[in-house]
Image (cartoon, helix red, strand yellow):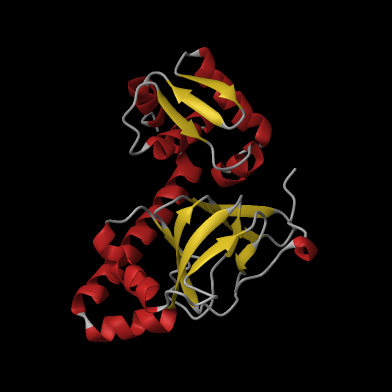
Amino acid sequence: MRTTPDKGQQTRLGASHVPLACDDDCRFFREECQSQEGRPEGPLLKVSRGTTIYSHEQPAHFCYRLIEGAVRLYRVLPDGRRQILEICLPGETFGLETSDTYSATAEAIGEVIVLRCPRACIAELQDERPETRQAMLSMLSRGMCAAQDHVAMLGHQSARERVACYLLRLALGHDERPCVITLPMGRQDMADYLGLTIETTCRSLSDLKEARIITTPDRHRILIHNMEKLEAVAARS
């Protein structure tokens, strides 16, 4: 069952999400970090598990670069259910909005470290440096493409294909074989993000295990033994 987080237990700090970007795209994050070095409130923030970094429709004063941990971006539907729009991983940028308010709520799944950059600083850098403006356009474009891919996944892929695609995303940058990936969230978050029930998500993982494509040493780790077969499952849609 999907549940709405208890607002009384949330700590507030205050969506759009941008997939893994090249280092040049985030030059303004590094410069902002240097300009605020030693200040107690930024720009590096350690965020506790379950903390709300910002809320849906809150004024979008900052954008964030995830350094460690994982962050869920979600909305609460009119019937009270939670729809996870994205799971952000280290190296990804979130909170980069085209409007004046956040399009989703951002919440730390576990302990996380984020690099926070004021939106006003980004606007100043865009005015001063054409390369920053181009980097921002590139990041927004990738964010739109990622959102379109997610909609296509929910509309056309089977449960096994969705799970396979997500495991492949987590495996990016891992060259070892078998590939060992650590799930940044629990099965319920994974199911919510993939638009599945938790029972269907677990059954899809079991199907991949029976096909000897993956094994699960524990609830937080998955070993991918046959990357080619996993890619074939993901490509069937």
Q: Quadrant of the image for the C terminus?
A: top left
Compared with 216, 166 (above or below) is below
Horizontal arrangement in the rendering, residue 141 relative to residue 181 (left or right): left
Compared with 140, 157 (above or below) is above
Q: Where residue 89 sits: x, y (%)?
A: 46, 50
* Residue 226 or residue 47, whichever sits in front: 47
Horizontal arrangement in the rendering, residue 68 relative to residue 195 (left or right): left
Which of the 4 quarters of the picture holds residue 168? top left
* Residue 110 or residue 94, whichever sits in front: 110
- How many marks the image carries: the answer is 0
Which of the 4 quarters of the picture holds residue 49? bottom right
- Residue located at (31% from left, 56% from top): 21
- Residue located at (35% from left, 83% from top): 123
- Residue located at (30% from left, 70% from top): 136
Q: Quadrant of the image for the N terminus?
A: top right
Horizontal arrangement in the rendering, residue 113 relative to residue 192 (left or right): left
Q: Where residue 208 sits: x, y (%)?
A: 50, 20
- Which residue is the extreme one toward the front? 38
Compared with 166, 62 (above or below) is below
- Residue located at (28% from left, 81% from top): 126
- Which residue is the extreme one toward the left? 130
Q: Where residue 156 sits: x, y (%)?
A: 46, 40
Q: Where residue 57 sits: x, y (%)?
A: 60, 75
